[in-house]
Image (tube, rainbow, N blue to C red):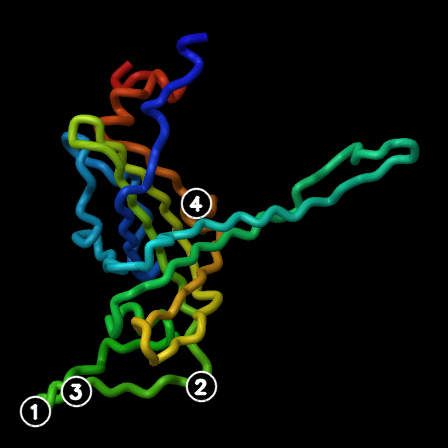
Amino acid sequence: MKDADHRGLVRKSKRAMGFIRRASEGELPEAITGPNSLPVDLKALGFKPIGLVTPDGYRFGRDVEKDDVDALGYSSFVRTDVLRVARTIAFNPLQFGQRHLNEIRYGMDLSGVTPDATTGEIVFDEPDLPIDDEYQLIVVADDGPAANNWIMGRGYGAVKLANADEEAWGQSVIQNALTFDVFTDDELGTPVRHYLGGTGAKASADILGYASAGA
């Protein structure tokens, strides 16, 4: 019984960082850690950081729709089948005005917009209908000291903005929560890629139930 519980597997997301790029810019990385179990440089792969978000962080929704079968004489279902799983990602950015986030919010291409040479002012016109572009999104979180560091990640090969909450200009900080729908990535054939690495995960492979690295 003493080996049934493992206190070291209780994880927190002490820090979490989101990175995004257009889905057309490549495939999801095979791994998010490199030599010495350190995180790879996602910015070097063309991903742009989402930056600061509110303390509730990144929320991964998974809404399962089932078909339940009743039978005469039974008070519980005799069969259930999963029909679909609607997945979403939601977060609330705090950094205001970044070009790549504005392109997502408003569904437009801002690559040709430049600051005024004299005043530095940025001006763009929001389109009537947004461009439904798809993006790749990776969220990376870590927990623990360097010697027992856990790097947790989720990669989404195809997401699209589903909703942007109202934006209030008042006494509080300006924020605009974003929710994305998740689709099955054509290259992966799956909607989500899960990553679990770092020095902690490497040392605990047997406890996690996986074969030891190099075995």
The quadrant of the rendering that contains the C terminus is: top left
Q: What residue would you read off at disc 4?
A: 192
In this rendering, the label closer to the viewer, 2 or 1: 1
For marks 2 and 3, give the one nearer the viewer: 3
Q: Residues within 10 Å of mark 1 (few under 14, many from 20)?
A: few
Q: Foreground residue, 102 or 186? A: 102
Q: What secondary structure is marked by label 1?
A: loop
The amino acid on which the numbered mark 1 sits, given as a three-letter code, is: Thr
Numbered disc 3: secondary structure: loop
Residue at the image point whose x is 40% and y is 63% from the top: 134
Q: Along the line of sight, which residue is nearer the eye, 102 or 147?
A: 147
Helix, strand or loop status at disc 2:
loop
Task: Please give the residue where the numbered disc 1 appears in the rendered image.
Answer: 118
Mark 3 surroundings within 10 Å by alpha-carbon count, few (fewer than 14), some (14 through 19), many (20 or more): few
Residue denoted by label 2 = 128
From this view, report whether residue 174 is shown above or below residue 153: below
Sequence-first tag of 4 and 3: 3
* Crowd class of label 2 (few under 14; some 14 to 19; many from 20; radius 10 Å): few
Q: CA distance from mark 4 to mark 1?
A: 46 Å
Residue type indicated by callout 4? Val
Q: Report the side of 190 relative to 152 (left or right).
A: right
| Residue that extends furthest to the left in the rendered view of this protein | 118
Crowding at mark 4 (Cα within 10 Å: few <14, some 14-19, many 20+): some
Relative image position of residue 89 (x, y in whole percent): 44, 55
Q: Residue furthest front?
A: 171
The residue indicated by pointer 3 is 121
